[in-house]
Structure formats: structure tokens, C-alpha cells
């Protein structure tokens, strides 16, 4: 054995549930490569604490490249997926590309950079 993990075929990866996929040797390689690429830091807040590797798209599941995944901390990941950390009275804006949450606290700071050429809102992950 040469220490290289047995990589599953694309057919095997596509047949897996998402939970199984996250346990695959392939995902372990993608995850580590992504953490290395982003130096183990959340791309939004730059923390190294409790980071996750987030799929920006699932189109290339099983053959992800560096643009398909990104590093987010637990808090930023939660904001993106669930909007749980936003106050109840705050308007929630959704990203035109991924339907994730656009942090309205940053709208004033980013101004027109937050708006696509079609006038739609874009989240932090899709801007990277």
C-alpha cells in the first residue's frame, strides 16, 4: 500500500447519499484541498474557528474543482443557509444565484457591488 486512499469512481460517488458522500475518500481530499487553498480561514470573516467546507454548487459533486467549494465558519455558514442569526424584524434578502442569504448589514458597505447586472442581489459566496 502506498498511502494513497482508494478513490471512489464517479458512479459510486453519484450513487451515494449526501451523508455517505461526506464520508468518502474523495470528499476528504476535496475538503483538505479547500482548507489548504483558503489557509483554513472563513472567506467572509477570516476566522479559523469551527470552519466548514461549503458547496457553492452541487453540479460537479464527485468532481469538484476549486470554484465549487469554499471555507466558511459555522456562523457564516449558518447565516448563508438558514438566516437564523438575523433579527426577526430584519428584511431577508436572497441571493439570485444560490438563494442563500445576503447579509443586509453589509449592503451599505458594498453598495452596487452587491447587485448583479440584472439588478438582483448577490451573496458573499457568489461574489468570490
Image (tube, rainbow, N blue to C red):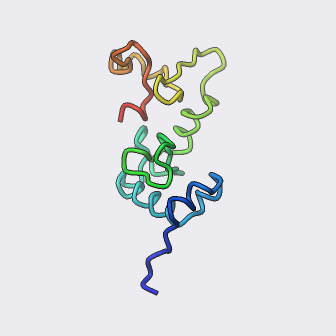
Residue 106: quadrant of the picture: top left
Residue 37: quadrant of the picture: bottom left
The vertical placement of 109 against 46, above or below, is above
Name the spot of residue 10 as percent of width and height, x first: 50, 59
The vertical placement of 6 against 39, above or below, is below
Q: Residue at x 48, y 40 (%)?
A: 57
Name the spot of residue 83 as percent of width and height, x first: 61, 28
Q: Residue at x 58, y 57 (%)?
A: 22
Name the spot of residue 36 as percent of width and height, x first: 37, 58
Relative to the observer, which residue lies in front, 86 or 22? 22
Q: Residue at x 45, y 28 (%)?
A: 123
Q: Residue at x 42, y 24 (%)?
A: 122
Quadrant of image for the C terminus: top left
Name the spot of residue 62 as percent of width and height, x first: 49, 55
The extreme bottom residue here reads: 1
The extreme front residue here reads: 11
- Asked whether, in this view, residue 73 is left or right of residue 33, the answer is right
The vertical placement of 65 against 111, above or below, is below
- Asked whether, in this view, residue 66 is left or right of residue 79, the answer is left
Count of residue discs: 0
Amino acid at each position: 500500500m502506498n498511502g494513497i486512499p482508494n478513490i471512489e469512481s464517479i458512479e459510486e460517488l453519484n450513487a451515494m447519499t449526501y451523508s455517505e458522500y461526506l464520508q468518502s475518500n474523495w470528499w476528504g481530499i476535496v475538503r483538505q484541498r479547500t482548507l489548504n487553498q483558503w489557509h483554513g480561514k472563513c472567506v467572509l470573516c477570516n476566522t479559523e474557528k469551527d470552519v466548514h467546507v461549503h458547496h457553492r454548487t452541487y453540479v460537479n459533486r464527485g468532481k469538484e474543482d476549486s470554484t465549487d467549494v469554499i471555507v466558511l465558519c459555522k456562523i457564516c455558514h449558518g447565516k448563508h443557509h438558514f438566516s437564523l442569526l438575523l433579527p426577526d424584524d430584519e428584511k431577508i434578502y436572497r441571493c439570485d444565484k444560490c438563494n442563500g442569504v445576503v447579509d443586509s448589514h453589509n449592503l451599505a458597505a458594498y453598495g452596487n457591488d452587491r447587485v448583479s447586472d440584472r439588478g438582483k442581489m448577490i451573496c458573499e459566496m457568489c461574489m468570490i
